[in-house]
Image (cartoon, grey):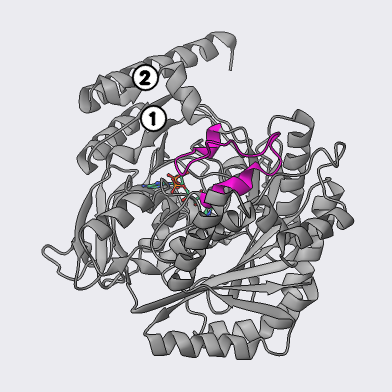
Amino acid sequence: MNNEQQEQDVATVAADFAAALMQWRAVLGEEHVRTTDADLDRYARTCSSSARRALAVLRPASRDEVVALVRIARTFKTPLYPLSAGQNWGYGDACPVREGQVIVDLGRMNRIHTVDGELGYAVIEPGVTQRQLAEHLAEQGMPFWCDCTGSGPNSSLIGNIVERGFGHTPYGNRIQTISGLEVVLGSGEVLETGFGHYANARTTHVYPYGVGPFLDGLFTQSNFGIVTRLGLWLLPIPKSFCPFLVLFKEDEDLLAALPALRHLRLTRVLHSVPHIGNDLRALSSDGAFPRNALPERARLTPELRQQMRQAAGIGAWAMSGAFYGTRAQVWLHRRLLKQALRGVHAKVMFLPPWLLRLGRAAANFCNRLGLLPALDRKIRAAESLAGMHSGRPTGFFLRGAYWRKQGGWPSDLSDDTDLAGAGVGIMWMAPILPFRAEDLARLNQEMDTLFSSHGFDCHVTVNMINERALAAVYTIDYDAEDAMETARALECYEQGVARLYDLGYPLYRASTRGMSLLSPQGQDTFWQTVEHLKTALDPEGIIAPGRYQPGIFMGRDGAARSLG
Ligand SMILES: Cc1cc2nc3c(=O)[nH]c(=O)nc-3n(C[C@H](O)[C@H](O)[C@H](O)COP(=O)(O)OP(=O)(O)OC[C@H]3O[C@@H](n4cnc5c(N)ncnc54)[C@H](O)[C@@H]3O)c2cc1C
């Protein structure tokens, strides 16, 4: 292509984009088409080194507006990148996967259309946040809780679900608790899944599969459409509820307990999504990396780590979860948990609501006398844990992201803090592994060696996502304000992802940075099929090019290319 032709092409693209903006403004109003530097910079903030500035931000208020703006985007071949609340922290934040995309921020579409108080489901739009649904259920006196993740009250439900994220209640494997999606396809058509496409179907939100191919999964971890509504099942509030903590002193103690825990999960004694975190996860919620003691390093020495564990009264691992049911069921499950762990070194603690109330009263009393500040912190952590397990989302766990930030978390850290703008650095690698001690031991060792070679502490959580699999999350916590450390973190991430595929533990979810690494063995039949579906459902490639579409990053030789 010669220079003249290139200039002409650039001019055409610019003219098309200007025309698209004009039409979007006509549909949404001037106020809801944002192009100022301040707006674009705000959406480009990142806590996972994935800053990518969009061309514009569109803020539709209804499904019909989404349809209109998709049609305009098709006409002018301008790619769109949908966001629900845009709090995909550690996985790419609110940033598109590639350059040259226009963000569709669905935050104004925040209606809760229905809550069925008999059958226990809500029909919600993408802008509905965890807090909004939780408060709505409480205000309406509904006998239901919504499942909560640890990512804070302002995270969305739909954005999390389309990423196949998970919470921690019995409805924590969220993808199994949705029924009936409304999706605006890249073609501009509106698809209703399950029974939703039958006029007057009364079963759309109670039976997800409908009749015929089951399509819901196609609209999670994909770029075929924009989900504008879905039915979400709600957890009946149990008569009795009891959070628990299990402390394991050493790595071996957790590994020894794993077969018994698996049995409890398989037999549904453990019926929520218990979460097991290593000592670093607990320490990072209680303070910052002791930079003064280790000025030259990003990793704790074994001695200091041991001292910090002892000071915090924790072991190498802690498991948290909750039991739900009648009083008799909860008592039985408590007993079965204790029995199952009898042969291993584990300290089991139950935190029923009455005990937490007592703890709170004691902490308040001590606070007034200026005594035992650690008690208040411990009770606060336990309250947050209990809240997350009982439909009350909390921002408490956001503080862990400040581990490597100079000065730790700010004194005004609130539930509303947007981590993307906080100057913290976190990248998650989240592989699935079989629920087996040998797999966990192997993976932990591999990851610790990798993190160590890059000078990082290896923060680990392991979640019992279902009866047979564990969803591990290896977190690179880094100082995003230190360029060298950030470069090391990126290298650690890319090597880590490659290693996970090599070892046979692929990720359950990719960050925007990881999209280019999804197909280490080239364009196999799976990803080719995904491309065929993309062509059928979004012929102009308008929706989120590159999102779970590794083919777009491949060189002519079919080899994966890094996002850089
Ligand atoms: C301390 C901490 C704790 C966390 N805990 C958890 C946890 O317990 N569980 C968990 O799963 N995650 C967790 N996260 C990760 C993340 O913050 C959450 O998953 C969060 O819910 C994602 O943000 P969001 O809901 O605003 O989704 P968004 O950022 O809005 O969406 C995520 C992605 O989905 C796509 N998308 C969004 N909406 C639509 C739509 N309507 N149609 C089509 N595509 C769409 C977009 O491409 C977007 O990039 C945690 C993060 C931190 C920092």
The location of residue 317, given as percent across then percent down, is 70, 67
Q: 232 left or right of 365?
A: left
Q: Label the magenta part by its dominant secondary structure.
A: loop
The stretch drawn in magenta includes residue 61: no
Q: Residue at x 67, y 56 (%)?
A: 281
Q: Residue at x 53, y 58 (%)?
A: 363
- Judge whether 154 appears above or below 169 on screen: above
Report if residue 13 is visible in the image.
yes
- Judge whether 466 appears above or below 489 on screen: below
Q: Give the total number of marks visible in the rendering.
A: 2
Q: Residue furthest front?
A: 369
Q: Nearer the viewer, residue 74 or 145?
A: 145
The location of residue 378, given as percent across then percent down, is 59, 59
**Residue interval drawn in magenta:** 396-421
Secondary structure category for the residue under label 1: loop
Q: Which residue position holds label 1?
A: 77
- Callout 1 environment at 10 Å: few (<14), some (14 to 19), or many (20+)? some
Q: Which quarter of the rendered picture does the C terminus lie within?
A: top right
The location of residue 174, given as percent across then percent down, is 42, 64
Question: Is the C-beta of the residue carrying label 2 under 8 Å from the nearest atom of ligand 1?
Answer: no
Q: 41 left or right of 442?
A: left
- Judge whether 83 appears above or below 375 on screen: above
- Judge whether 326 appears above or below 16 on screen: below
Q: Are marks 2 and 1 in contact (CB under 8 Å)?
A: yes
Q: Which residue position holds label 2?
A: 16
